[in-house]
């Protein structure tokens, strides 16, 4: 999967959105607890700066605190940047900085070998295994896209959900399916198919083999099949809705327990004791 050509397209939709916001819109609350529209846009700017400084320029970020976990570190540094830096920026300057740094980030992605190791894992897909750059880049794309949707939700302006932009988000999130099912006991040959209707959707199948789950392209009848719409799926994966809410929007055939396990899909970094 190569999402690099999509960054300027997604960013163009974001900048068009921001350009049309009024003063009241920038202060509207979002799904990110404690953050308004301005804060989420500032967080997106932080993502650009963090990646250019650390990935392109090799500049170390702030150190971990004593005993601090990765999720706690991410939460703390994100909050510090928004509170200490981006709240000082006007909406116009914030938009200008995103427009200026975005092409620099595009150039950085273009120089990365997609198959080279990224240097760290993607914890919700393959913890403990170095991710390739293509997966790390796809993860970044999903974050940008999801935050744009949170902004659109907050100001009541849907958009940026065409198949070109949305399908890669779903495809990336569903790399989490084998890890999601890791603790579900099943015999070798069991399978779970997740089906998303519509032009942005598709079919993804996880198969049990040699005591672990993996994605597969088999057309064999699955042990369980879950049908769920694209909007519900991305919100489930980012905990914009709960697994219970997702289940109410899904259709299930076959093994109910296996399907229920699939509907705990999570594709963001969280503290281990946070409810899934």
Image (tube, rainbow, N blue to C red):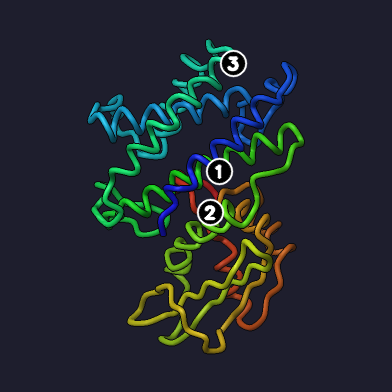
Q: Residue at x 55, y 67 (%)?
A: 262
Q: Residue at x 52, y 89 (%)?
A: 220
Q: Residue at x 54, y 53 (%)?
A: 276
Q: Which mark is residue 169?
A: 2
Circle nearer the viewer, 3 or 2: 3
Task: Report crowding for label 1: few under 14, some 14 to 19, many 20 or more residues within 10 A (C-alpha).
Answer: many
User: Taking the image as drawn, is residue 191 in sight?
Assistant: yes
Relative image position of residue 246 (x, y in whole percent): 68, 59
Q: Which mark is residue 145?
A: 1
Seen in the image, is 228 located left or right of residue 39? right
Seen in the image, is 155 located left or right of residue 38? right
Which residue was labeled with disc 3? 92
User: Taking the image as drawn, is residue 273 in sight?
Assistant: no
Circle nearer the viewer, 1 or 3: 3
Of the numbered discs 2 and 1, the one sitting upstream in the chain is 1
**Image quadrant containing the N terminus:** bottom left
Task: Report crowding for label 2: few under 14, some 14 to 19, many 20 or more residues within 10 A (C-alpha).
Answer: many
Q: Are marks 2 and 1 in contact (CB under 8 Å)?
A: yes
Q: Which mark is residue 45?
A: none
């Amino acid at each position: 999967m190569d999402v690099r050509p999509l960054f300027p397209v997604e960013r163009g939709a974001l900048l068009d959105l921001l350009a049309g916001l009024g003063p009241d819109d920038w202060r509207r609350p979002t799904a990110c607890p404690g953050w308004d529209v301005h804060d989420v846009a500032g967080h997106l700017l932080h993502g650009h700066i963090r990646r250019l400084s650390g990935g392109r320029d090799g500049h170390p970020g702030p150190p971990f605190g004593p005993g601090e976990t990765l999720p706690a570190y991410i939460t703390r540094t994100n909050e510090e940047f928004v509170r200490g830096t981006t709240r000082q920026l006007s909406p116009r300057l914030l938009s200008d900085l995103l427009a200026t740094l975005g092409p620099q980030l595009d150039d950085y992605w273009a120089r990365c070998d997609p198959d080279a190791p990224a240097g760290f894992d993607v914890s919700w897909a393959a913890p403990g295994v170095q991710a390739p750059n293509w997966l790390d880049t796809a993860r970044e794309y999903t974050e940008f896209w999801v935050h744009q949707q949170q902004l659109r939700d907050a100001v009541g302006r849907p958009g940026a959900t065409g198949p070109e932009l949305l399908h890669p988000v779903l495809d990336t999130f569903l790399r989490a399916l084998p890890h999601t099912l890791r603790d579900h006991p099943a015999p070798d040959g069991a399978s779970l198919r997740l089906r998303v209707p519509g032009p942005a959707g598709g079919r993804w199948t996880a198969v049990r083999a040699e005591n672990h789950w993996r994605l597969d392209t088999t057309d064999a009848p699955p042990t369980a099949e879950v049908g769920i719409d694209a909007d519900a799926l991305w919100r489930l994966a980012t905990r914009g809705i709960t697994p219970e809410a997702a289940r109410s929007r899904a259709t299930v055939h076959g093994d109910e327990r296996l399907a229920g396990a699939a509907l705990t899909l999570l594709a963001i970094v969280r503290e281990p004791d946070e409810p899934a």
